[in-house]
Every structure is written in structure tokens, then in C-alpha cells.
Amino acid sequence: MTGPVPSGIDEIGLQPGSHVCAFYRGDSDRDRLLAGYLGAGLTAGDKCICIVDSADAAERLGTLPGACGEPGPFGGQLDIHLPESTYLAGGEFTATDMLTFWTEAMVKAEIAGYSFCRLVGEMTWALRDAPGVEHLIGYESELNRVTASSPVVVLCLYDLDRFGGEVVVNVVKTHPQVLIQRILVENPYYIGPDEFLPSVPA
Amino acid sequence: MTAEQTIPRPVPHHAAGAQQAADANLRERLSEFRALLVILLLMTESVSEDQILELAASSAPGLGSARIEGYGFSDGQWRAAGPAADGVSTSDIARQLTALGQGGGQVDLPGRRWVWAYPLCSGSGLIGHLVASSQLEPSAEQRFLIQVIAQQTGVAVSNARLHARERATAAELAATNAALAQTVTSLRRSMDIHDRLTQVAVSGEGQAGIAKALHELTGMPVAIEDRYGNLAAWAGPGRPDPYPKESFAKREHLLRRLMRARKPIQDGERLVLLASPRPELLGIVALIDPDRAADTADLVALEHGATVLSMELARLRGIADTELRLCRDLVHDLLSGTDDESALARAEALNYDLRRPHRVVVVEGKGRARAHDALLSAVRRALRTARQDGLCEIWSGHVAIVTAGQGNWEQLRRAMASDLGSQCRIGVGSLSARPSELPRSLREAGLALRLQKTLLPGSSACEYPKLGIFRMLASISDLTDVEAFVREWLGSLLDYDTRRKAELVHTLTQYLEHGGNYDATAAELSVHKSTLKYRLQRIRDLTGLELNDPDVHFNLQLATRAWGTLQALRDES
């Protein structure tokens, strides 16, 4: 697959390998993005892997048309996870573990016969006072390297009601594409992991 | 060719030469511009002033070394972007910002090496300043970024304020519209209520129509009662059968409460209101509302309903008063003498059939029954009970009845006496074929009444047609011979009575009328038997007549009856 795939959000197409940071305001806006994005993936036969920050949101996603199987790892076409078993597995955030999680998930999807993956993570977990959260922007930068050449699109969701301007600035600087107010803002000058990572504290 | 293709991909910084470092720096600046663009987009999208200020302040650290201390607004308000720094006086900042004017410039803050105020401008001018600080003087590029943030913050805050004003105005308009809509709804309902009840009032649907309309308007069962608690009309389901009636004391208490309140009051499961066009004229309208669900519109309907009921009660009373007055006038004219045509027409207007032969009956009360109103009421009740129609009116201290009845007059008299609790007498005239003849019947009734009092024993009804010799005597036009006959037989007694103020003629009359029975005569005269015997002896002495002689007895009885008739005729004249 080489051409853009429909994101399912406001007629926006995404190139395979895209790592898009999406800003929204409030739960209803988040649910709108998730329903469109995952709905398009389920329709297209993509493997969809989703991490949301509340059991309520997970339950609502389970009712999406096309979602099959029980929520949980590889229970069906749509996998729904909570931060406790992903970003914060083991009680702290480590970029390496999380990147491994995504890598393995994509490999398993390929083995299961899926030709394309659609990943999405709700990032509000990063507002918790958990160890390793300070490595979030570095992780986002490094994720570009994992996804760049894979048959995958990734959506990172940031709630503007809860994240401040500094996070927005740093996310934009490290993401090649930012979805905001239904506009996909391209950033061809984004700072790649090789440049960004040495500049942030380890 | 995309922008990405024009910019060399990053080279690991640890291997950077001078050119590569310059390229990386340029890409960093360009990337910051992209981030700034996103921040500005978010500011533009936001309608919350707090959100905009917080976004501007929190984004600054990502764009360089400077931080935003806060915002000073033209109204003197200072909003810190974070925790207040030690030794910073907001009044001092406000004073410095005021001195700067629209241009912005350097500001002194304790413990800060570089502090700069950037103007926050809107389309209408300066709205305040953004105050940024840094421990090192920022580069020109960083100062430019902060300046852009300040400029866009000013525009976004201005827009947000405008938007807030518009929202407030819209909310105010919406509230006004909602209130207006509610007022219109209430007015429409009030008009419906007014229209419906006005229709009832003008169409003469009466109390049943009022109850029905109120039931339709409120959805609740409706009762209309008279002042005594009797049901006058009911509309809606659940009509009690039999209709309950309160005790007199309880009813009076409720009426007093209603008169004091002058508005609907709760009476058990009912919401009641008084309808009283005149103090002596009362009615009650009640909504049966066990759940107390009546709303303002229901109360309006109840009040309108009570008003219409007041009009209806006044109308009914007016009709009754008019009928009564017309009836009085007619009776007066019939007894005084009137032409047939006029009398028949007026009687027809009163829905009374005067074409039948009528007679006059005169009723005289005794004791308490002499009160005219009480006597008149007793006569009306007795006629109603006897199912006998007639027109009644006070006449010369008595009650005169114009009636077509052929009834048992003694039974009627007893019914009146029983009602009054005292004796009464009645005299009955003969039937008159035409209304114009009724004065004759009146004269006969009056004569019968007087003869009954003077000559006849007891108080029983006296019918003129049955008076026999009295009737014959009364019909004689020239009474000279009659008077001479009376004088011939009773002259000495009459003179004695006049001289001594005695009652020998009356005593003789009763003795003869009672067939010479001493006991009955004494009882009638209310005297002792020996007194009676003494009087009879005086009569014998004065007249020289033997009372037991049949011829004497006949002439004396005729003379006493003629004397009574003459007395009655004299009283009449």
C-alpha cells in the first residue's frame, strides 16, 4: 500500500507510516475522532489497536460497528487497552517498552494476516504523576522512527483542556503532522529523534 | 517539490559541521514557527479568555528561554500567569504599564534580568500588556516569537470578549424570548379562558354552562353550590350521589373564610371561590383538586368562572325581582279593577294563565302572623304544598290571593296556621269569569272574613258562596228595611250596649248560633256559664221576649244575622 489511506476524520487522507498528533477538546470530541478513525480502519479490514484512558471510553469503543471479539489483546480486529497494561505497565513509563509493545503488536497483526495497522493512543495518562512521564516527548519523537517505514498509521490524542501550550509546542516540533481543528498541519521541519532526543533529559 | 525536499534531512548533531549546525538551527526555528502557528490556531479557535491566556503562557517555554509573568489589562487588573514571584507588586507593575502606553517596553521586576511588556492590541486599541521575563536576554528570534504571541493573544482575547458579549446578549435575548413566549402562552390561555367564559355568559348557558366550561378549561371536576351548600351544577366525572351537605355552622365558617380571603382557598380536596354580586346573594365555585395540581391558569379560570357566576346570580335575582314586582303590580290592579285585555297580557308576560275563572281569597293573620312578610311567605308555602297556583300580595293589612283553585280552603287555612304557629282566618270570594270582575270577589272575600269574625263560631274558613242568608242580605242594595227589621227586634239591646258598652247583641248572636247550648256559647264568649245566664236574663228583661218561642227565636236569629251583615257592610265601607 503506497497511496494515502482515509483517516476517517474529516476527509483527511494519511500516508502509510504517518504519525499524527491530534488535538481535541473534551471527551465528546475525542470520541468523534476515535469513532471516525477506528471505524474507517474496521471497514477497511485494518488491524486496529487502541489505548484509551478510561474504562467508559473502552466500553463505548466496543460497540463500534465491525468491532468483534472480546476487548483485549488480539481478541479480534479491534484491540482496546488501558494505560495500566501499556504505557504504564509495570507502574512506570519507559519509551523502550512502549515502542516494543507497538512493534510486537504490528508483527503479530501481520502474522494474523492483517496487511495494515491503525494505532491510536489517548495521551491523558501522561498527566498522572507516574515515573517516566517526562520521557513522553522523546518517546513521541522515537515513535516516528518505528512507524516511518511500516504499513501503519498512528494517532496520538492530546486533550487541549488538559495539556498546556508547552506540550503542544513540543509535540508539533516532533511530529511531522498535527491534526488540529479539522486541519492537518504538515511540519516538514519537524525535529527527528536523532536531533530531539539528545536535547532532552534522559 | 515539497518544503521537506528543500530542507536537508537532519544530520546527527554530534557530526555537525558549522553549515550543518546552521541548517539544524534554521530547521529548529522553522519548526518553532509551525508550533507557533498551531498555538495561534488554537487561540483563534478558543472563546475563553482564560484558556487563551493560559495557552499563551504555557506555550512560551517551548519557544525559548522566556516565560510569561502575566498580563496587565487597561482596567488596572493584573493576572499572573503562574505563582507570583517574591517581591513583585501588582500595583507597581500596573503603574509601570500605564506609563508605557501603547508601545510597550522594558519593565522592572525584582529578581529578573530581562523583563519586557508587549502590548495586547485589538481592533479597537490597547487592551493591556503581556509581560515576559528571562534570566538571559532572549535572542531576536525568540523576542519576535513572544511579540507574535502577544499580538495574537490581544486579538484572540478581544475576540473572546466580543464573543462572550455576544453570547451574553444571545442568552439574554433567548431568556427574553422564552419569557415572552411564556407570557404569550399565558396570555393566550387567559384569552381562551376569557373567551370561553364570556361565551357562556352571553349565551345564557346558566350555571350548568359555567361548570361545563370550567371543567373543559381546567380538566378538573367542577361544582357550583348555593350559599347553603346545595349543588346547583356539576361538570366532570365523580359526581357524589347523594351530594354531601355540610352542617350549617361549618358552611357559615367556610363562607366567612371566603369573604375574608377574597381569593380561592383550599377546602379539603377542593379549591373554592366565592361568587357574590351582592352581600345577601352568594354562590360558590369549586374545582375538585385532590392532588392540588391547579396551576396559575387554572386559578385564572376559576376567578373568571366566579365572576361569570356572580353575573349569572345577579341576573337570576334580577329576573326574580322583576317578576315579583310585575306580579305585585298585576295583583294590585286586579284587586283594584282593571280591564281584561291589559290584565291578560301582563299575566301572559308572567307566564300565568289568567283566562281561567279566578277568585280572591283574603287571609288575616293573628299575633306574630300579622307580620306581612311572614304571612305572605306562609301563604306561598301553603299554596305550593297544596299544588295550587295563584298570585299573592299584601292587601290592606291582609294577604290577598288571586287563584283559580277550587281547593279545600279550611285545609289550606290549617296549613298556614301550622306554618305560622298561630291562628289565621280566611275569607273566600266567589269565582269571577273575567279579571275585571275580581274586585267583586275581593269584596265578597272581605265580607266573608268579617262575618266569620263577627258571627260565626271558631276560625274556620269562610266561603262567601256558602253564606246563605248572609249572602242574600249582603246582596240587597237598599238596606233600609233590613235596618228597620234589626231595629225592631234588637233596638233595645243595641241601645243598652251603646249606653253600657255591653255585648248583649253579640251574646244573643252566639247563643242563637250555638242552638241555645249554654256550654258552647260560654266557651265561645270565653265567659262563665252563670255570666251567660245573667246576660240572657237581661236580654229577656230588656226585650220582654221569650227566647224559647220558635217564632221569636227565628226572628231574633234573622235579626242578629242581618245585624252582623250590616256590621260587615259598614266595615267594608
Image (tube, coloured by chain):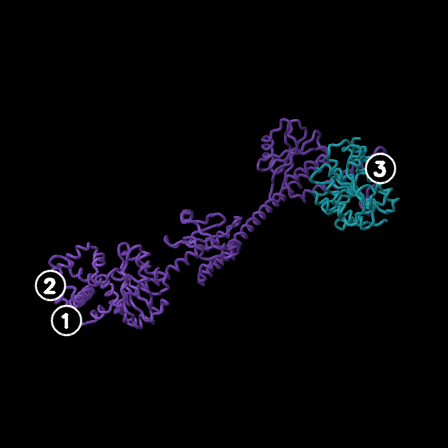
What tint does the image give chain A? cyan
Query: How far separated are the C-alphas under marks 2 and 3?
Result: 164 Å
* Disc nearest the viewer among 2 and 3: 2
Q: Position of residue B35 (x, y in %)?
A: 74, 40
From the image, tell me which residue sits under label 1. Answer: B481
Q: Amino acid at mark 3?
A: Thr
The amino acid sitting under disc 1 is: Asp
**In this image, B161 relative to B305: left or right?**
right
Q: Mark 2 sits on what residue?
A: B544
Q: Nearer the viewer, residue B349 or A69?
A: B349
Give yes or no for contact between labels 2 and 3 (Cβ–Cβ under 8 Å): no
Mark 2 residue element: loop
Front tag of 1 and 3: 1
Mark 3 chain: A
> In the rendered image of this protein, does residue B258 appear above or below residue B435?
above
Q: Which residue is mark 3?
A: A100
- The disc placed on residue A107 is none
Label 1 and label 2: CA atoms lie apart by: 23 Å
Q: Which chain did the renderer colour purple?
A: B
